[in-house]
Amino acid sequence: MIRPQAIKYEIADKQKAIAAGGIGTLLELTKQLDLRKEINRAIPLFKLHLPYDEADHVLNIAMNLLAGGNCLEHIEDRRQDEAYLNAVGAVRIPAQPPRTTSAVASTQPTCCT
């Protein structure tokens, strides 16, 4: 679940960091605008939020883009990046959505790395 504590920046000799600028700003803006509540209200997909709600999925995709991902498959990179997980205040984040097997999906370009 993506629920960071107060954003703080530290400089130390041995510090894990991410190259993705803007993550802290996005999370702070999300809190100030109460965006999680608005996303969950606007996109009522899940009956239960165990453990993720709609906002977790939407914010996960947005932060993947900010972190340099250019396709859903790059979310897996974020899931394995301890510094990224620490930055967003998460122990884990949602996995990428499953791929469909429809003809439409097969015409879509594959992920660029």
Image: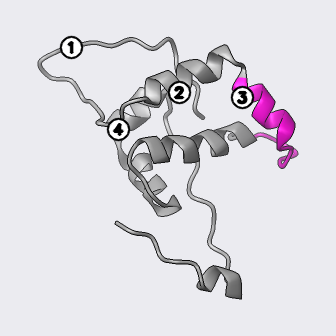
> In the image, what residue type sits under mark 4?
Glu
* CB-based contact (under 8 Å), mark 4 and mark 1: no
The residue at 56%/54% (across/down) is 95
- Residue 82: give its label: 4
* Side (left or right) of 102 relative to 8: right
> In the image, what residue type sits under mark 2?
Leu
| Residue, disc 3 | 36
* CB-based contact (under 8 Å), mark 4 and mark 2: no
Label 3 CA crowd tier, 10 Å (few <14, some 14–19, many 20+): some
Picture coordinates of residue 54, whole percent (x, y):
74, 42
Query: Which of the two discs, 2 and 1, labels the residue nearer the N terminus?
Result: 1
> In the image, what residue type sits under mark 1?
Ile
Label 2 CA crowd tier, 10 Å (few <14, some 14–19, many 20+): some
* Side (left or right) of 81 relative to 24: left
Task: Give the Cα distance between marks 3 and 1.
Answer: 30 Å
Query: Disc 2 or disc 3, which is closer to the eye?
Result: 2
Q: Is residue 11 above or below residue 54?
A: above
* CB-based contact (under 8 Å), mark 4 and mark 3: no
- Residue 26: give its label: 2
* Side (left or right) of 48 relative to 57: right
| Residue, disc 1 | 11
Picture coordinates of residue 17, whole percent (x, y):
27, 30
SS at mark 1? loop
- Can see residue 53? no
* CB-based contact (under 8 Å), mark 3 and mark 1: no
The residue at 60%/35% (across/down) is 1
- The quadrant the C terminus occupies is bottom left
SS at mark 3? helix
